[in-house]
Structure formats: C-alpha cells, structure tokens
Amino acid sequence: MSSKAGSLLPASTCRKPLPEVLGPDLCVGARQLAMLTELIRDTYVLFDKVISVHPVMLGSQWKRHVVAVTHYGRLYGLKLRNNERLASTEETASRLAVLLSAPNAYQTFRVRLPDTLHVPGAGLLFARDERVNLTEWPAGEKHLSRLFPEELAELRRPGNVESFLGQMGEWMGFAEIFGQEDTDMAGSWIIVPGGWRLQLTTAATAFTRPPSWGCAFRWHLPWEEIAALDVTHPTFTHLAAGMAQMIDKYRERESEVRQILAESETGRGWEPHVPEPTPEWIFGKLQDCLAGRNNQMIARPLIPLPSERGVAWSWRDPS
C-alpha cells in the first residue's frame, strides 16, 4: 500500500502536545500506519503522514476509539460502533452541525477500512472493509471536566463566560431542533482554552423524541445557583441569544437541512422542532429538569454564571 502522503514532508518531526485523554503510543506497525495515512489523505485531501496511534481513555466509546496522530500534529479519531444506527446518526448529525455552523463543529465521515487495523495494545481489531467513523479533532482541545483551576479562572472572566453561554445556547438550539438527548456525558464536551471554543463531540442519539437537553446540560452549569435565579438573570439571556442564533441559521438553510435528513436512514422522517427561543422558555425547561432531577446524576458545577454587573459569580471548588 502506498504511503505517498509522507513523501513531501521534511525530515524533522513537528509534534504538538497530545490531549491528556489519549493514552500511550500503541506501536502500530508501519504497514498499518501507511494504510491510515492513505485513508485520511483520501478523505480529507490532505498531505500528511500518520506516525502513531493512541487509545482514547475517556467517553462512553473509549474501548472502541483510537486516535491517529500525524506528523504535523493533526488528530483523527477512528471510532468502531457496534450499533449501525448510532454510527449513521452520528454522521448525519455532524453534517447538519457543519451545515449550520454550530460552534466548532467537525464532520464525521463513515468510511471503510481498506485493510485490517490490528491494535494489540488496546485489544482492538478493525477488520478489513469494516466501517468506522472518522472525525478530525481540534488542536489544543480539553474536556470540560478536566480544566485546570487557572483555566477555569480565565473562563469565568467577563466576556469569556458570556461567550461560553452563547455557544452552549447554540448547541441547546441544535439539540432541540434535532432531538439530541445524549449530551450528559462529561466526555462529550470539549473546549479549546484561550479562544474558549466549545464543541459537542457526539450526537449519536439525535432524532430522539422528546429531546432531553434541559437535564443533559446540567454537567456544565452550576445548578444550585440556577435554582435560586429568576428568569431575568443574564444567564438565560445569553443562552437564549445563542439558541436564537442557531434557529436563525436553521431557518436560512431549512431546505438543505431537509435534504440531508431525507438522505439519511436515521434522519428520514424526523420533523425538526423549532421553539421560540426566549429566556422564559429556557428557564422553564431548566426548572423542569431541576424539579425531577436525580441527585446521583448531578455532576459538580464547572462553569460560573455571569452576574448582572458583568462579573462572573464565584465558583467554589467542591473538592
């Protein structure tokens, strides 16, 4: 198998620090590295070379999820899903997210492996012609659940926390339109410190009715504080503004959205739900979640709320 993608590279290796959720190099053989190089090159029309493969140590699919690292530090996740419906849904939802310019969305491609990929260090065997979900990972990403205290301090600065809530509002809008319910895993959310770009990494359970994002987003908002707020608090204004932005983008490209849904086995027949994105509507959804919540499912709050004066609320380290 050809590995021409590496022929244009300089001799030196330019590697960036790997995300902390990745395990050690699994020492995949040269032939299989060349196979992955060709697969990524053909999918992304990109001249780069895969130099290592690492296991993903976080997330519900971590036992069937590896990341190929390239010479120039790009990251490409390969996920083997046993459930074809979930795999297809993830691909369709990612196409919709990219179409609607959801915050930092990356498209997932459903591809066939041209050869067997044996990853002995992870106990994985990706068979020849097996279909996997291939997704590029953003550079510098971190899971929200693994931010350092100094990064949280930076995130809660005025301007940053409002941007965070706006991006989360957009993803709330996406979840509501397409019935996404599985967003309550800490490993499903990543953010790039510095620019504070928020991303939902999986939408494998989209097109599920009714959507349950009101409880799902509990991982990243301080619920004890939310329970004491009224609807006039700026938190709901920022969330509603983000949701309204997503709904506007949906309405502008509705015909294209419906075409993607019609082409998808899992999306076909789904009728998008477009709410009126007001602070009152979001407030009601979140309060419904609080009223019926299971305390064992509530994670520690990560992100503080903005105050009416534009200064972030205090955040108490629960550890």
Image: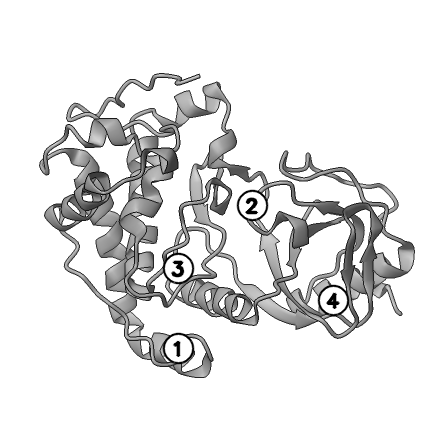
Q: Earlier in the sequence, mark 1 or mark 3?
A: 3
Give the labeled residue for mark 4.
Answer: 39
Residue found 19% across the figure and 48% down from its top: 285
Q: In this view, does 201 lie above or below 207?
A: above
Label 1 environment density (alpha carbons within 10 Å; few <14, some 14–19, many ≥20): many
Check contact, mark 2 vs mark 3: CB within 8 A.
no
Residue at image point 36% right, 56% down = 181
Mark 2 residue element: loop
Residue 214: image x %, image y %?
27, 48
Lateral position of residue 258 relative to residue 263, left or right: left
Name the residue carrying label 3: 101
Q: Earlier in the sequence, mark 1 or mark 4?
A: 4
- Is residue 202 shown above or below 96? above
* Disc 1, SS: helix
For marks 2 and 3, the one nearer the N-term is 2
**Residue type indicated by callout 3:** Ser
Element at label 3: loop
Q: What element carries label 4?
A: helix
> Mark 2 vs mark 4: which is more N-terminal?
4
Mark 1 sits on what residue? 261
Give amino acid for label 2: Gly
